[in-house]
Protein backbone atom coordinates (compact mmCIF):
# COMPACT_ATOMS: atom_id res chain seq x y z
CA UNK A 1 0.00 0.00 0.00
CA UNK A 2 1.39 3.42 -0.96
CA UNK A 3 2.42 5.71 1.86
CA UNK A 4 -0.41 8.19 2.27
CA UNK A 5 0.19 11.92 2.01
CA UNK A 6 1.23 13.45 5.32
CA UNK A 7 -1.70 15.87 5.11
CA UNK A 8 -4.33 14.64 2.67
CA UNK A 9 -6.54 17.35 1.18
CA UNK A 10 -9.41 14.96 0.50
CA UNK A 11 -10.82 11.81 2.08
CA UNK A 12 -14.17 10.07 2.50
CA UNK A 13 -14.52 10.21 6.30
CA UNK A 14 -12.67 12.74 8.47
CA UNK A 15 -12.53 11.56 12.11
CA UNK A 16 -11.84 14.16 14.79
CA UNK A 17 -10.27 12.46 17.84
CA UNK A 18 -7.62 9.73 18.11
CA UNK A 19 -8.92 8.03 21.24
CA UNK A 20 -10.38 4.50 21.19
CA UNK A 21 -13.59 5.56 19.39
CA UNK A 22 -11.86 7.38 16.54
CA UNK A 23 -9.12 4.80 16.11
CA UNK A 24 -11.49 1.82 16.13
CA UNK A 25 -13.73 3.39 13.49
CA UNK A 26 -10.70 4.40 11.41
CA UNK A 27 -9.35 0.85 11.44
CA UNK A 28 -12.71 -0.77 10.61
CA UNK A 29 -13.37 1.63 7.71
CA UNK A 30 -9.85 1.17 6.35
CA UNK A 31 -10.33 -2.60 6.25
CA UNK A 32 -13.41 -2.02 4.12
CA UNK A 33 -11.53 0.28 1.75
CA UNK A 34 -13.16 3.46 3.02
CA UNK A 35 -10.59 6.26 3.09
CA UNK A 36 -10.37 8.17 6.34
CA UNK A 37 -8.12 10.54 8.27
CA UNK A 38 -7.88 10.90 12.07
CA UNK A 39 -7.08 14.34 13.47
CA UNK A 40 -5.85 14.17 17.09
CA UNK A 41 -5.11 17.26 19.15
CA UNK A 42 -2.54 15.58 21.41
CA UNK A 43 0.60 13.53 20.86
CA UNK A 44 0.34 9.74 20.78
CA UNK A 45 2.29 9.48 24.04
CA UNK A 46 -0.18 11.85 25.72
CA UNK A 47 -3.17 9.82 24.53
CA UNK A 48 -1.51 6.62 25.73
CA UNK A 49 -0.72 8.14 29.13
CA UNK A 50 -4.40 8.22 30.07
CA UNK A 51 -5.45 5.65 32.70
CA UNK A 52 -9.01 4.48 32.08
CA UNK A 53 -11.29 1.55 32.95
CA UNK A 54 -10.48 -2.02 32.05
CA UNK A 55 -13.63 -4.12 31.53
CA UNK A 56 -14.69 -4.97 27.96
CA UNK A 57 -18.09 -6.34 27.00
CA UNK A 58 -18.09 -9.32 24.66
CA UNK A 59 -19.41 -7.07 21.88
CA UNK A 60 -16.47 -4.70 22.20
CA UNK A 61 -13.98 -7.56 22.26
CA UNK A 62 -15.60 -8.95 19.09
CA UNK A 63 -15.30 -5.55 17.41
CA UNK A 64 -11.58 -5.44 18.26
CA UNK A 65 -11.12 -8.86 16.62
CA UNK A 66 -13.09 -7.68 13.56
CA UNK A 67 -10.69 -4.72 13.40
CA UNK A 68 -7.73 -7.16 13.42
CA UNK A 69 -6.69 -5.71 16.81
CA UNK A 70 -7.71 -8.49 19.17
CA UNK A 71 -4.61 -10.72 19.20
CA UNK A 72 -2.85 -9.21 22.28
CA UNK A 73 -6.20 -8.69 24.04
CA UNK A 74 -6.97 -12.41 23.64
CA UNK A 75 -3.44 -13.32 24.72
CA UNK A 76 -3.02 -11.00 27.69
CA UNK A 77 -6.59 -10.11 28.67
CA UNK A 78 -8.45 -12.11 31.32
CA UNK A 79 -11.90 -13.60 30.84
CA UNK A 80 -13.98 -13.02 33.97
CA UNK A 81 -17.15 -15.05 34.58
CA UNK A 82 -18.20 -13.06 37.64
CA UNK A 83 -17.47 -10.32 40.14
CA UNK A 84 -18.12 -9.69 43.85
CA UNK A 85 -20.21 -7.17 45.71
CA UNK A 86 -18.99 -6.59 49.27
CA UNK A 87 -21.59 -5.35 51.76
CA UNK A 88 -22.20 -5.86 55.46
CA UNK A 89 -18.69 -7.32 55.82
CA UNK A 90 -19.53 -10.15 53.42
CA UNK A 91 -18.63 -10.98 49.80
CA UNK A 92 -21.50 -11.95 47.46
CA UNK A 93 -20.56 -13.21 44.00
CA UNK A 94 -22.46 -12.27 40.86
CA UNK A 95 -22.08 -15.28 38.57
CA UNK A 96 -22.18 -13.59 35.16
CA UNK A 97 -21.78 -16.86 33.29
CA UNK A 98 -24.75 -18.49 35.04
CA UNK A 99 -27.05 -15.46 34.90
CA UNK A 100 -26.35 -14.28 31.35
CA UNK A 101 -26.62 -17.54 29.38
CA UNK A 102 -22.86 -18.10 29.41
CA UNK A 103 -21.57 -14.59 28.78
CA UNK A 104 -18.48 -13.10 30.42
CA UNK A 105 -16.33 -9.95 30.27
CA UNK A 106 -12.74 -9.34 29.20
CA UNK A 107 -10.50 -7.52 31.70
CA UNK A 108 -7.99 -5.60 29.58
CA UNK A 109 -6.95 -1.97 30.14
CA UNK A 110 -8.25 0.77 27.84
CA UNK A 111 -4.69 2.05 27.49
CA UNK A 112 -3.78 -1.33 25.96
CA UNK A 113 -6.86 -1.20 23.71
CA UNK A 114 -5.71 2.21 22.46
CA UNK A 115 -2.12 1.01 22.02
CA UNK A 116 -3.31 -1.99 20.00
CA UNK A 117 -5.42 0.29 17.81
CA UNK A 118 -2.52 2.66 17.16
CA UNK A 119 -0.25 -0.24 16.22
CA UNK A 120 -2.90 -1.60 13.87
CA UNK A 121 -3.23 1.80 12.19
CA UNK A 122 0.54 1.86 11.74
CA UNK A 123 0.50 -1.60 10.14
CA UNK A 124 -2.03 -0.42 7.56
CA UNK A 125 -0.29 2.93 7.06
CA UNK A 126 -3.42 4.61 8.41
CA UNK A 127 -3.41 8.42 8.49
CA UNK A 128 -3.48 9.62 12.10
CA UNK A 129 -2.33 13.23 12.40
CA UNK A 130 -1.20 14.16 15.92
CA UNK A 131 -0.78 17.64 17.38
CA UNK A 132 -3.54 18.88 15.04
CA UNK A 133 -4.45 22.31 16.38
CA UNK A 134 -7.64 24.35 16.05
CA UNK A 135 -9.49 21.54 14.31
CA UNK A 136 -12.74 22.95 12.96
CA UNK A 137 -15.48 21.23 10.93
CA UNK A 138 -17.26 23.34 8.31
CA UNK A 139 -20.35 23.14 6.06
CA UNK A 140 -21.86 20.30 8.07
CA UNK A 141 -25.34 21.04 6.82
CA UNK A 142 -25.59 22.64 3.37
CA UNK A 143 -28.54 23.89 1.31
CA UNK A 144 -26.68 22.96 -1.88
CA UNK A 145 -28.02 19.99 -3.91
CA UNK A 146 -27.13 16.69 -2.20
CA UNK A 147 -24.02 15.16 -3.68
CA UNK A 148 -22.79 18.44 -5.16
CA UNK A 149 -19.28 19.59 -4.24
CA UNK A 150 -20.82 22.59 -2.44
CA UNK A 151 -22.84 20.28 -0.19
CA UNK A 152 -19.76 18.51 1.16
CA UNK A 153 -18.25 19.27 4.58
CA UNK A 154 -14.59 20.03 5.16
CA UNK A 155 -12.30 20.28 8.16
CA UNK A 156 -9.55 22.82 8.75
CA UNK A 157 -6.68 22.59 11.21
CA UNK A 158 -3.15 23.77 11.86
CA UNK A 159 -0.09 21.57 12.20
CA UNK A 160 3.44 22.77 12.93
CA UNK A 161 2.37 26.28 12.03
CA UNK A 162 0.90 25.36 8.62
CA UNK A 163 -2.82 25.52 7.83
CA UNK A 164 -4.59 22.56 6.24
CA UNK A 165 -8.01 21.72 4.84
CA UNK A 166 -9.51 18.27 4.26
CA UNK A 167 -12.55 17.93 1.97
CA UNK A 168 -14.66 14.90 2.88
CA UNK A 169 -18.08 13.28 2.63
CA UNK A 170 -18.63 12.91 6.36
CA UNK A 171 -17.15 14.15 9.64
CA UNK A 172 -17.13 11.91 12.73
CA UNK A 173 -16.83 13.66 16.09
CA UNK A 174 -14.93 11.16 18.24
CA UNK A 175 -13.26 13.96 20.17
CA UNK A 176 -14.58 13.28 23.63
CA UNK A 177 -16.52 15.42 26.07
CA UNK A 178 -14.28 18.47 25.64
CA UNK A 179 -14.06 18.22 21.86
CA UNK A 180 -15.09 20.67 19.15
CA UNK A 181 -17.63 18.46 17.36
CA UNK A 182 -20.63 18.56 19.73
CA UNK A 183 -20.12 22.31 20.02
CA UNK A 184 -20.44 22.56 16.24
CA UNK A 185 -24.10 21.56 16.46
CA UNK A 186 -26.29 24.70 16.72
CA UNK A 187 -27.63 25.24 20.24
CA UNK A 188 -31.23 25.29 19.00
CA UNK A 189 -30.71 21.78 17.63
CA UNK A 190 -28.66 20.22 20.44
CA UNK A 191 -30.32 18.97 23.64
CA UNK A 192 -28.07 18.02 26.56
CA UNK A 193 -28.97 15.94 29.61
CA UNK A 194 -26.70 15.88 32.67
CA UNK A 195 -26.57 14.51 36.19
CA UNK A 196 -23.64 15.38 38.48
CA UNK A 197 -22.94 13.09 41.46
CA UNK A 198 -21.88 14.61 44.81
CA UNK A 199 -18.61 12.65 44.95
CA UNK A 200 -15.62 11.47 42.92
CA UNK A 201 -13.34 8.44 42.72
CA UNK A 202 -9.75 8.53 43.99
CA UNK A 203 -7.92 5.93 41.92
CA UNK A 204 -4.53 4.28 42.49
CA UNK A 205 -2.51 2.09 40.13
CA UNK A 206 0.08 -0.11 41.85
CA UNK A 207 2.53 -2.81 40.76
CA UNK A 208 1.04 -5.28 43.24
CA UNK A 209 -0.85 -8.55 42.77
CA UNK A 210 -4.64 -8.05 42.71
CA UNK A 211 -6.34 -8.71 46.05
CA UNK A 212 -8.95 -10.88 44.32
CA UNK A 213 -9.10 -12.96 41.12
CA UNK A 214 -12.32 -11.10 40.24
CA UNK A 215 -13.39 -7.49 40.75
CA UNK A 216 -14.84 -6.44 44.09
CA UNK A 217 -17.40 -3.58 44.22
CA UNK A 218 -17.67 -2.60 47.89
CA UNK A 219 -20.64 -0.77 49.41
CA UNK A 220 -19.64 0.65 52.81
CA UNK A 221 -20.94 3.36 55.14
CA UNK A 222 -17.59 5.15 54.76
CA UNK A 223 -18.06 5.15 50.99
CA UNK A 224 -17.73 3.00 47.88
CA UNK A 225 -14.53 1.13 47.00
CA UNK A 226 -13.50 -0.95 43.99
CA UNK A 227 -10.75 -3.54 43.65
CA UNK A 228 -9.79 -4.08 40.00
CA UNK A 229 -6.71 -5.03 38.01
CA UNK A 230 -4.78 -4.63 34.76
CA UNK A 231 -2.83 -7.92 35.04
CA UNK A 232 -1.65 -10.34 37.72
CA UNK A 233 1.07 -7.84 38.69
CA UNK A 234 -0.77 -4.55 38.18
CA UNK A 235 -3.72 -3.57 40.36
CA UNK A 236 -6.22 -0.74 40.15
CA UNK A 237 -8.11 0.44 43.25
CA UNK A 238 -10.65 3.22 43.85
CA UNK A 239 -12.33 4.81 46.85
CA UNK A 240 -15.23 7.27 46.80
CA UNK A 241 -14.19 10.74 48.00
CA UNK A 242 -16.04 14.08 48.40
CA UNK A 243 -15.99 16.40 45.38
CA UNK A 244 -14.03 18.87 47.52
CA UNK A 245 -11.22 16.36 48.10
CA UNK A 246 -7.74 16.60 46.61
CA UNK A 247 -5.08 14.04 45.69
CA UNK A 248 -2.69 16.04 47.86
CA UNK A 249 -4.71 14.98 50.89
CA UNK A 250 -3.94 11.34 50.25
CA UNK A 251 -0.58 9.74 50.94
CA UNK A 252 -0.27 6.18 49.68
CA UNK A 253 -0.49 4.95 53.26
CA UNK A 254 -3.68 6.93 53.91
CA UNK A 255 -5.20 5.51 50.74
CA UNK A 256 -4.41 1.89 51.62
CA UNK A 257 -5.70 2.29 55.19
CA UNK A 258 -9.00 3.79 53.97
CA UNK A 259 -9.40 1.11 51.31
CA UNK A 260 -8.91 -1.60 53.93
CA UNK A 261 -11.57 -0.02 56.15
CA UNK A 262 -14.11 -0.37 53.34
CA UNK A 263 -13.34 -4.02 52.54
CA UNK A 264 -14.40 -7.20 54.38
CA UNK A 265 -11.75 -8.19 56.92
CA UNK A 266 -10.77 -11.35 55.03
CA UNK A 267 -10.04 -9.20 51.95
CA UNK A 268 -8.34 -6.34 53.78
CA UNK A 269 -6.00 -8.79 55.53
CA UNK A 270 -4.70 -10.14 52.23
CA UNK A 271 -4.37 -6.78 50.46
CA UNK A 272 -0.83 -6.32 49.11
CA UNK A 273 0.01 -2.62 49.17
CA UNK A 274 2.80 -0.77 47.39
CA UNK A 275 3.80 2.61 45.95
CA UNK A 276 1.22 4.25 43.71
CA UNK A 277 2.43 4.63 40.12
CA UNK A 278 -0.63 6.72 39.31
CA UNK A 279 -3.01 8.51 41.66
CA UNK A 280 -5.88 10.78 40.56
CA UNK A 281 -9.40 11.91 41.38
CA UNK A 282 -12.17 11.78 38.75
CA UNK A 283 -15.59 13.37 39.27
CA UNK A 284 -18.65 11.26 38.46
CA UNK A 285 -21.11 12.53 35.90
CA UNK A 286 -23.86 11.27 33.57
CA UNK A 287 -24.28 13.12 30.30
CA UNK A 288 -26.07 12.61 26.97
CA UNK A 289 -26.23 14.92 23.95
CA UNK A 290 -28.98 14.51 21.36
CA UNK A 291 -29.08 14.13 18.40
CA UNK A 292 -25.88 12.23 17.59
CA UNK A 293 -26.10 13.40 13.99
CA UNK A 294 -26.23 16.88 12.48
CA UNK A 295 -26.12 16.93 8.70
CA UNK A 296 -22.87 15.25 7.71
CA UNK A 297 -21.53 15.20 11.29
CA UNK A 298 -21.86 12.06 13.43
CA UNK A 299 -20.96 12.04 17.13
CA UNK A 300 -19.53 8.88 18.71
CA UNK A 301 -18.24 7.94 22.16
CA UNK A 302 -17.55 10.48 24.88
CA UNK A 303 -18.32 13.32 22.46
CA UNK A 304 -21.98 12.34 22.87
CA UNK A 305 -22.22 10.66 26.26
CA UNK A 306 -20.51 10.19 29.60
CA UNK A 307 -21.29 7.65 32.32
CA UNK A 308 -20.01 7.32 35.90
CA UNK A 309 -17.34 4.56 35.80
CA UNK A 310 -19.24 2.33 38.24
CA UNK A 311 -20.61 0.10 35.53
CA UNK A 312 -17.53 0.28 33.26
CA UNK A 313 -19.80 1.29 30.36
CA UNK A 314 -17.83 4.24 28.90
CA UNK A 315 -15.65 2.46 26.36
CA UNK A 316 -18.28 -0.22 25.78
CA UNK A 317 -20.94 2.33 24.82
CA UNK A 318 -18.43 3.99 22.50
CA UNK A 319 -18.10 0.51 20.99
CA UNK A 320 -21.79 0.23 20.11
CA UNK A 321 -21.75 3.72 18.55
CA UNK A 322 -18.81 2.67 16.39
CA UNK A 323 -20.51 -0.62 15.48
CA UNK A 324 -23.62 1.18 14.20
CA UNK A 325 -21.71 3.96 12.42
CA UNK A 326 -19.24 1.57 10.79
CA UNK A 327 -22.00 -0.60 9.32
CA UNK A 328 -23.98 2.47 8.22
CA UNK A 329 -20.97 3.91 6.36
CA UNK A 330 -20.19 0.57 4.71
CA UNK A 331 -23.85 0.35 3.62
CA UNK A 332 -23.60 3.85 2.12
CA UNK A 333 -20.36 3.34 0.20
CA UNK A 334 -20.93 -0.28 -0.82
CA UNK A 335 -24.64 -0.14 -1.73
CA UNK A 336 -25.62 3.54 -1.83
CA UNK A 337 -28.04 2.71 0.98
CA UNK A 338 -28.31 5.51 3.58
CA UNK A 339 -30.74 3.72 5.91
CA UNK A 340 -28.08 3.13 8.54
CA UNK A 341 -26.89 6.75 8.46
CA UNK A 342 -30.45 8.03 8.75
CA UNK A 343 -31.15 5.67 11.68
CA UNK A 344 -27.76 6.10 13.40
CA UNK A 345 -28.70 8.70 16.01
CA UNK A 346 -31.91 7.00 17.14
CA UNK A 347 -30.31 3.54 17.09
CA UNK A 348 -27.20 4.62 19.03
CA UNK A 349 -29.19 6.67 21.57
CA UNK A 350 -31.54 3.77 22.29
CA UNK A 351 -28.57 1.77 23.62
CA UNK A 352 -26.82 4.83 25.11
CA UNK A 353 -29.78 5.50 27.40
CA UNK A 354 -29.88 1.86 28.53
CA UNK A 355 -26.23 2.08 29.57
CA UNK A 356 -26.96 5.42 31.25
CA UNK A 357 -29.69 3.69 33.25
CA UNK A 358 -27.41 0.80 34.24
CA UNK A 359 -24.53 3.10 35.26
CA UNK A 360 -26.87 5.32 37.28
CA UNK A 361 -28.49 2.27 38.95
CA UNK A 362 -25.19 0.74 40.03
CA UNK A 363 -23.84 4.10 41.19
CA UNK A 364 -27.00 4.78 43.21
CA UNK A 365 -26.90 1.33 44.73
CA UNK A 366 -23.28 1.23 45.84
CA UNK A 367 -22.28 4.76 46.84
CA UNK A 368 -22.88 6.74 50.03
CA UNK A 369 -24.88 9.87 49.26
CA UNK A 370 -24.29 12.74 51.70
CA UNK A 371 -27.95 13.83 51.62
CA UNK A 372 -29.46 10.34 51.84
CA UNK A 373 -32.05 9.96 54.59
CA UNK A 374 -32.23 6.90 56.85
CA UNK A 375 -35.08 5.74 54.61
CA UNK A 376 -32.87 6.09 51.50
CA UNK A 377 -30.15 4.04 53.18
CA UNK A 378 -32.66 1.29 54.01
CA UNK A 379 -33.76 1.25 50.37
CA UNK A 380 -30.14 0.72 49.26
CA UNK A 381 -29.79 -2.18 51.69
CA UNK A 382 -33.06 -3.82 50.66
CA UNK A 383 -32.14 -3.39 46.99
CA UNK A 384 -28.99 -5.45 47.60
CA UNK A 385 -30.95 -8.04 49.61
CA UNK A 386 -33.49 -8.31 46.77
CA UNK A 387 -30.72 -8.58 44.16
CA UNK A 388 -29.15 -11.61 45.81
CA UNK A 389 -32.53 -13.22 46.51
CA UNK A 390 -33.76 -13.06 42.92
CA UNK A 391 -32.45 -15.01 39.94
CA UNK A 392 -34.27 -12.53 37.68
CA UNK A 393 -32.65 -9.51 39.34
CA UNK A 394 -29.22 -11.15 38.99
CA UNK A 395 -30.07 -11.93 35.38
CA UNK A 396 -30.84 -8.28 34.70
CA UNK A 397 -27.57 -7.21 36.33
CA UNK A 398 -25.57 -9.82 34.42
CA UNK A 399 -27.06 -9.03 31.00
CA UNK A 400 -26.23 -5.36 31.45
CA UNK A 401 -22.73 -5.95 32.84
CA UNK A 402 -21.70 -8.41 30.10
CA UNK A 403 -23.26 -6.10 27.53
CA UNK A 404 -26.69 -5.55 26.03
CA UNK A 405 -26.87 -6.62 22.39
CA UNK A 406 -25.73 -4.11 19.76
N1 LIG B 1 -9.34 18.24 17.96
C1 LIG B 1 -8.73 17.03 17.84
N2 LIG B 1 -8.76 16.07 18.80
C2 LIG B 1 -9.45 16.36 19.92
C3 LIG B 1 -10.12 17.58 20.12
C4 LIG B 1 -10.06 18.54 19.07
N3 LIG B 1 -10.68 19.72 19.19
N4 LIG B 1 -10.71 17.56 21.35
C5 LIG B 1 -10.42 16.36 21.90
N5 LIG B 1 -9.66 15.64 21.05
C6 LIG B 1 -9.13 14.28 21.25
C7 LIG B 1 -8.64 14.02 22.67
O1 LIG B 1 -7.28 14.43 22.82
C8 LIG B 1 -8.80 12.51 22.79
O2 LIG B 1 -7.61 11.82 22.44
O3 LIG B 1 -10.19 13.37 21.07
C9 LIG B 1 -9.90 12.16 21.78
C10 LIG B 1 -11.16 11.69 22.47
O4 LIG B 1 -10.85 10.47 23.14
P1 LIG B 1 -11.65 10.03 24.49
O5 LIG B 1 -11.88 11.23 25.33
O6 LIG B 1 -10.91 8.85 25.08
O7 LIG B 1 -13.08 9.57 23.99
P2 LIG B 1 -13.45 8.26 23.15
O8 LIG B 1 -12.45 7.95 22.10
O9 LIG B 1 -14.87 8.43 22.79
O10 LIG B 1 -13.31 7.07 24.21
C11 LIG B 1 -14.29 6.88 25.17
O11 LIG B 1 -12.63 7.13 26.84
O12 LIG B 1 -12.92 8.80 28.40
C12 LIG B 1 -12.99 7.46 28.20
O13 LIG B 1 -14.63 6.61 29.70
C13 LIG B 1 -14.39 6.97 28.38
O14 LIG B 1 -13.82 4.77 28.14
C14 LIG B 1 -14.42 5.84 27.46
C15 LIG B 1 -13.58 6.21 26.31
C1 LIG C 1 -10.98 -0.32 36.24
O1 LIG C 1 -10.36 -1.39 36.23
O2 LIG C 1 -10.44 0.80 36.11
C2 LIG C 1 -12.50 -0.38 36.43
C3 LIG C 1 -13.12 -1.61 36.43
C4 LIG C 1 -14.50 -1.68 36.60
C5 LIG C 1 -15.22 -0.51 36.77
C6 LIG C 1 -14.59 0.74 36.76
C7 LIG C 1 -13.21 0.81 36.59
O3 LIG C 1 -16.58 -0.60 36.95
Image (cartoon, grey):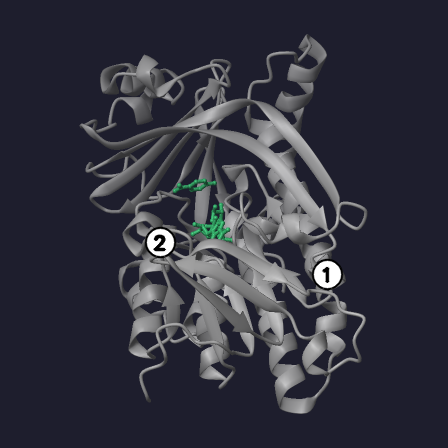
Crowdedness of circle 1 by 10 Å Cα count: few (<14), some, many (20+)?
some
Kindly identify which numbered label has been placed on residue 106. none
Residue 316, how many percent across, how many down? 52, 55
Q: Nearer the viewer, residue 82 or 98?
A: 82
Give the CA distance from mark 1 to mark 2: 34 Å
* Front-most of residues 229 and 117: 117
Is residue 320 found left or right of 108 in the rendered image? right
Q: Are marks 1 and 2 in contact (CB under 8 Å)?
A: no
Can I make out residue 317 in this image?
no
Quarter of the image with the N terminus is: bottom left
Where on the picture, by quarter, is residue 66? Answer: bottom left
Write the residue at 38% across / 67% down.
128
Residue drawn at point x = 42 percent, y = 53 percent: 41
| Residue placed most toward the observer, 217 or 116 | 116
Q: Earlier in the sequence, mark 1 or mark 2?
A: 2
Q: Secondary structure at mark 2?
A: loop
Q: Is residue 27 left or right of residue 297?
A: left
Q: How many marks?
A: 2
49 relative to 335, above or below = above
For label 2, the crowd category at 10 Å Cα-Cα, with few meaning under 14, some 14 to 19 and many 20 or more, is many
Q: Quadrant of the C terminus?
A: bottom right
Q: Nearer the viewer, residue 103 or 370?
A: 370
The kind of secondary structure element at disc 1 is strand
Q: Is residue 161 above or below residue 215?
A: below
x, y percent for residue 178 = 53, 43
Q: Mark 1 or mark 2, which is nearer to you?
A: 1
Residue 158 visible? The answer is yes
State the residue position of label 1.
294
Residue 108 numbered tag: 2
Horizontal and vertical percent position of residue 124: 34, 79
Task: Report x, y in % for residue 42.
Answer: 37, 51
Amino acid sequence: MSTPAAHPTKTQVCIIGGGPSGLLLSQLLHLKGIANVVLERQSRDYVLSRIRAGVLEQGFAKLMREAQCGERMDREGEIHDGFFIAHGGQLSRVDLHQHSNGNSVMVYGQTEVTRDLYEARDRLNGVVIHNAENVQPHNLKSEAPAGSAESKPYVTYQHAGASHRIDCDYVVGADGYHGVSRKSIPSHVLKEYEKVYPFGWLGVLSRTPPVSPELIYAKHERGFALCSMRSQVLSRYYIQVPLTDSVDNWSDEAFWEELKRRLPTEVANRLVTGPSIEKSIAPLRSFVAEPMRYGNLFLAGDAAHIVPPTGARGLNTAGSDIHYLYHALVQHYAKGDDTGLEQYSAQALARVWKTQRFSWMLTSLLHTFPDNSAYDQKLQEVELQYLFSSEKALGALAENYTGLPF
